[in-house]
Each structure stands twice: as C-alpha cells, then as structure tokens.
Image (cartoon, rainbow, N blue to C red):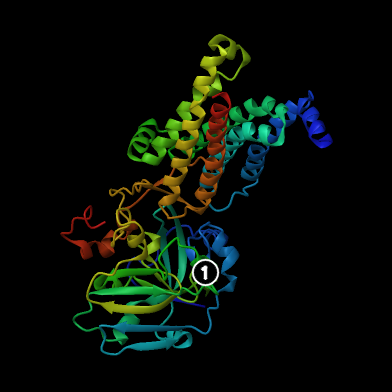
Amino acid sequence: MEGRASVNRALLQPWAKPLVWLLCALPLAWLFVRAAGDQLGANPAEALIHATGIWTIRWLWLTLAISPMRDVFGLPALLRHRRALGVTAFIYGLLHFLAYAWLDKGLVLDDIVRDVLKRNFILVGLLALILMTPLALTSFNRAIKALGGKRWQALHRLVYVVAVLGLLHFYWKKSAKNDVAEVLVYAVILAVLLGWRVARRRQKKVNTD
Amino acid sequence: LPGARSAVPGAIAMEKLTAYQDITTYNNFYEFGTGKDDPAENAHTLRPRPWTLSVEGEVGKPLTLGLDDLLKLAAMEERIYRLRCVEGWSMVIPWVGYSLSNLIKRAEPTSRAKYVEFVTLADPKQMPGVRSGVLDWPYVEGLRIDEAMHPLTLLAFGLYGEVLPNQNGAPLRLVVPWKYGFKSAKSIVKIRLVEKEPVSSWTKANRGEYGFYSNVNPKVDHPRWSQASERRIGEGGLFSPRKATLMFNGYEAQVGQLYAGMDLKKFY
C-alpha cells in the first residue's frame, strides 16, 4: 500500500514526464550509436529496419498496457504517461517506414509505390501507420478540447485497429520464412491486453444492469 | 584447406570478396536458430568429424564415404562465387571444393536417375533448432541431374582457404551459384539419385513461394522480396543504392542452356 502510493507520487512528479521521454528515446539513441560505430552487423540496413519495426510494436503494446496496469496495480498516475508512449510508437513507426523507403528503396517513389501495392504485408504496415497519423496529430490538449472528449475518444479507438494491423504486418513478414515464434509472443500479449478490455466492459454492464 | 585456382569457366568471379567476418556471422541455417546471428552462436555443438556421406538410390554402385575419403576424392579447387539469398542480399565467397559430378560419377547413376536429392543432418543433440517446427526436418533439397552434374555445382569443404566453419555447413555442403542460397544444402549426410522430382523442405513449407528450380531471376518476383535488386553485404554505406540482380545470378552464359525452352515464370 505504502509502495503503491509512493510510485503514484513519483509518477506525478514534474520530472516524471521528461524521464519517460528520455526512456522512449533510448532505443533510438542506442541504434544511432551502433550505426555510427558500424556495430549493426553484416546488414546494417536490415538491422535498422527491423529494430525500428519491432520497437514500434513494443511501444504500441506498452501504450495499450497502461489502462490494464493502472487498474490492476492501482496506479491512476500512469495515465499521465500514455500520450508519450503512443506518440513514441508513431515516431518509431514513421522511422521504420522511412528506413525502408530510404535504405531499401533509395527514396524512389515509383519503386516504393509498386512495392507497397504488390506486397500485402507492406500495404498493411503502411495502412497501420496512416491510421496512426490522426491519433498522433490529435494528441495535444487543444485537439482534445476542439474535438470534444467523446469524439476524441471514439477517434482514438482506432488504436485497436492499428495494433491488429501491425501484428498482421509482422506475421506476414515473418511467415515467409516460417519464423513465427516471436510473433506469437506479441500476439498472446495483445490478446491479453484486448481481452482485459472486453472483460471489463462485460463487468461494467453487469454492474449497471 | 588449400585449393588450386579453378579452371572451370565462370568459376572465378572478378569481384571484391565479402569479409570472412560477414560470411561467418550472417547466416541462414535454421538447424541452429532462425536469427542471422544464431548459427555463429550455436553451431559449436555440431561435430563435423567423424562424418559419413552416402550416395544411394538409382545408382549402380552405392557409396558410403568417410570425410577423409571425400577430401581425397578429387583435387581441391578455389572457386569465387556470388551468393544470392532469396531475401535480397548477396556476397562474394571464395569456396574450396570440387565439382559434385566427381562424386556422383563414382556411384554410376542408372538411366532412371533423373534427379538428385540432398538430405542434411538433423540431430537434435547437435542442432538445437531442429526441435522447433519451423521446417519439416531433415532439410531436403533437390536438383535435376543435369544441374547436379554441371561443373559449376560445387561440393564445398572450405572457404577462404580454411575448413568450413560449422555455421557455414561443415563439413561439406552444396554450392549452386545460379540459384537462391537455400538450394545449397549444408552439412549433407545423404545424396539420393531418384526418378521423380524431390520435394524440398521449403517447397513443402510454402509451395506458392518456393519452387523446385529457384533460379536467381530478377524478373520473377517473390511475394515478400523484390528480386530485381540486391544488397551486397559489406559494400558501400547505409545509403548506397542496391545493385541490379543478374539473370541466373550472372551465370547465364554457363547455365542458360540447361533451361532452353522452359517457361521460367512457371518453373520458378
């Protein structure tokens, strides 16, 4: 009980937000350091594309984990930090696409368009990124006010679609080589995160009936 | 493991060699894990000696040979081959070995030997990845008999003048330079001459994506990877453009006639 209260207090400190942003930037900083030092292995382009992609999924899953963790651990202050995680997921996703478009396709628009249309897994990934864009763009307090809480919330339910598309993108990519063990781990976590929401809804309904 | 410079036409690519470090740390060898760095990390458990290879099936003289006999079977040659992976990357590798035809001829194939099937080791005690269900083990690959007898088709025992490192398919592997890398089976224990086209492990896993021939062909796209271009490992910086992929990986002059009249879009 005592511990929980102090964690909550810490999460509310003025330095908590910058600290979260710093943590969000760490994987990227580490990638930069390794890229600059030629430490990304034999195929650094592939390593960068893969790392930014997997981190997009990790940040997105963490964003979705905030509500369940808040309730399960009794930490309401966690909610203050969800925005940073969501925006971070979008930034990593954007970098993932940029790394692909630049390092793999040399920023040749023709090639990118042809590749995206031909390969379902890239199309699905791009769709997820496109759907994330309005969420990132309306992540400011003023946007919430302008939209009104209800509409803002409805719009931000898109995050569930984004997560499923992101997982599908990851699965399709990995299934080419039958290498789906890692995808399964993320699928199970997402199932728990979404399942918890369904269960909570049912419970609320029962309580109000 | 020294080898004399090969005199086989096309056997010496005049290109910059890929670094030994890259060749031996960036591998697809699922018997040791699906990550590119897994084989280098896990393959130390493979015991390349003692090793026996059998040649059987539609042959007049079935053979079972130990590694020392295999090493002495023909003169070792150095061959500098381009290697093109279906994932869109490539290397230039100095292999040591001899033409597979030397071995197959000794077994005296019968007239019914139309194809050659390669079966590789699948020992869970030596290969941790075999416990996973990623592929139907053992790893099986196949060639048409004329492809197998082509002088460029190499039975390799070494690279960079040294004995093959475990992660590269010790103690002996196939190298078919005009086909995608997965056709070149590693750590082979059995070679069977057969009448019917063998079903390879990758074809079994995903028939729509991995055909029997799997010749490098920039005009036949794979659903996951564009085959029009490739990234040469270790060359240029992060932002240097990819190279155009060549028909039959640049070995068209040597092997093109094997496929005369075939629709390569259908027989991919």
Label 1 resides on the chain identified as: B
| Name of the residue lying farthest toward the bottom | B61
Crowd tier of the residue under label 1, counting other residues whose Cα lies within 10 Å: few below 14, some 14–19, many 20 or above = many
| Name of the residue lying farthest toward the top | A146
Does residue A144 sit above or below B235 in this rendering?
A: above
Does residue A19 sit above or below A183 in this rendering?
A: above
In which image quadrant can residue B61 be found?
Answer: bottom left
Q: Residue at x 44, y 70 (%)?
A: B186
Q: Residue at x 58, y 14 (%)?
A: A144
Please indicate, yes or no, whether residue A18 appears anywhere in the rendered image.
Answer: yes
Q: Quarter of the image for the C terminus of chain B: give it.
A: bottom left
Query: Residue A66 vs residue B105: left or right?
Result: right
Give how far across and how far down residue B217 sits, in percent: 30, 53
| Name of the residue lying farthest toward the right | A2
Viewer-proximal residue, B202 or A149?
A149
Per the image, the residue denoted by label 1 is: B160
In which image quadrant can residue B53 be found?
Answer: bottom left
Indicate the amino acid at tag 1: Tyr
Query: Residue B177 vs residue A51: left or right?
Result: left
